[in-house]
Image (cartoon, grey):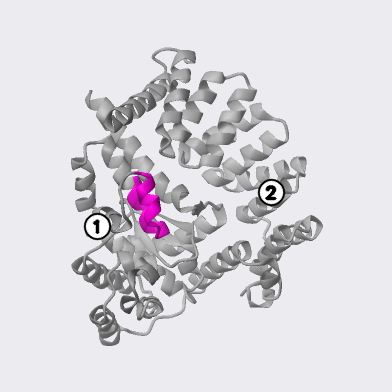
Amino acid sequence: MQRRERQLGHLIATAVIWLAMTLQAGAATLIRDADLEHALSELARPVLQAAGLSPNTVRVLIIQDDTMNAFIVDNSHIFIHSGLLLRMKTAAMLQSVIAHEAAHIANGHMARRAQNLQRANTISGLGVALAAAAAVASGRGDAAAGLGLGVRGSAQRIFMSHTRAEESAADSDGLRYMERAGLDTQGFSDVLNIFRGQEMLSQGRQDPYARTHPLSRDRLRAVEAYIQARRGEVKPDPDAAYWFARIDGKLSAFLRAPRWTLDRLDRSGTADIALMREAVAWHRTPDPARAIAAADRLVAMRPNDPFAHDLRGQILLESRQFPAAVAAYRKAADLAPRDALIQAGYGRALLAAGQPKAALGPLTAARDRDFRNAAMLRDLAVAYAKTGQEGMAALVTAERFALQGRLPDALIHANRAVGLLPRGSAPFNRAQDVVFAAEAAAKQRR
């Protein structure tokens, strides 16, 4: 029974994270891109180390949402809205947001909300957490209502809002982390100034950040006083500037109109980022020939950059040039064998090229390293089905539905998997875990 409870707790925690990633109720999605996530990890590493956190266990992820917000739902993930990222001008601004959220983690500010979830009776707490993540991140009360919580304000109070004391502590500790890492603390003030005046707006007009991170003139003054009193000379870090320009360049190329990007290629910072943006813009136009030509020039300029090959593979795959896409992704996977998103892309290309058996290798490798990728789980289920492994296809489908919070659908597929998989095997036990969680959820609803 204890083993089952631990597994159920793991599933609940995972589902909370997954909902924050997909935010289906709020019509927002997580942007999963190997290049962007690597660049974010490069910028986050010195900050997380200064906070005493492991860069290998805390990930920074982007939610596609035009509003401005950043938040945590557990001790392993920092979420930043694309709307906030695209308002930033420097690497220090992004690093200051990471530092602030890292301080919430290091100071244990999630512990109170975790205790609230534990008191919420296991699976019933799942509904609270899922509703809170959807409602607060999307800014929509109906997202909370759809999962039974009721109103957005309740979601904020129960799960994600920080007190003024927590915000003050996160500011002061975040500034210390920036200082300790040798980063420009002015980025902290620059970010807060984006939100200046938000506290004067009605709640419905505020950006989500202002609703979950209490903002006040005193808070702004305290941050600015700290910076003026302690700010020393900070040498510009060209690597940090490069990774920030790469994030800004690729993100804007995917989210803004292609013509907007093409008209601003000369503002990309470096020639390789300009080629990357050009390839994305022509791909979204769509103009496959020009997109592939730009991607070819990019990999010629950076032949050992796995993310250049990854982008080329994506463009070829979505242009239905499957053999060429397989070759591009194979090169990317060779250069970055431990990158789960690149492995998932390689598997998807093999599947599209009619090679489901070959696709199983990279797809299972991707699942082993990051099982919260819905597209990868869907592809893996298809690969299992096409190779005659119906039990495994049912299991992976059940896990995908469970992670999305679709527990009734998960139960159907998990029961099918239990009937098809060898009794006592590791996959059989995984299927039983989903059955246990889904049945517990059904009991709570009665």
Mark 1, residue position: 157
Report how many numbered discs are placed on residues in the image: 2
* Residue 402 lies in the magenta stretch: no
* Residue 132 lies in the magenta stretch: yes
- Give residue 273's quadrant in the image: bottom right
State the residue in front, 35 or 69.
Answer: 69
Q: Where residue 64 sits in the image (x, y, percent)?
A: 51, 58
Which type of secondary structure does the marked residue at label 1 adopt? helix
Q: Name the main secondary structure of what is drawn in magenta.
A: helix
- Magenta-drawn segment: 130-147
Residue 299 placement, left or right of 241? right
Task: Name the residue rendered at 54%, 65% in the picture.
Answer: 247
Task: Name the residue rendered at 78%, 55% in the picture.
Answer: 288
Q: Where residue 139 sits in the image (x, y, percent)?
A: 39, 60
Q: Which mark is residue 313?
A: 2
Which type of secondary structure does the marked residue at label 2 adopt? helix
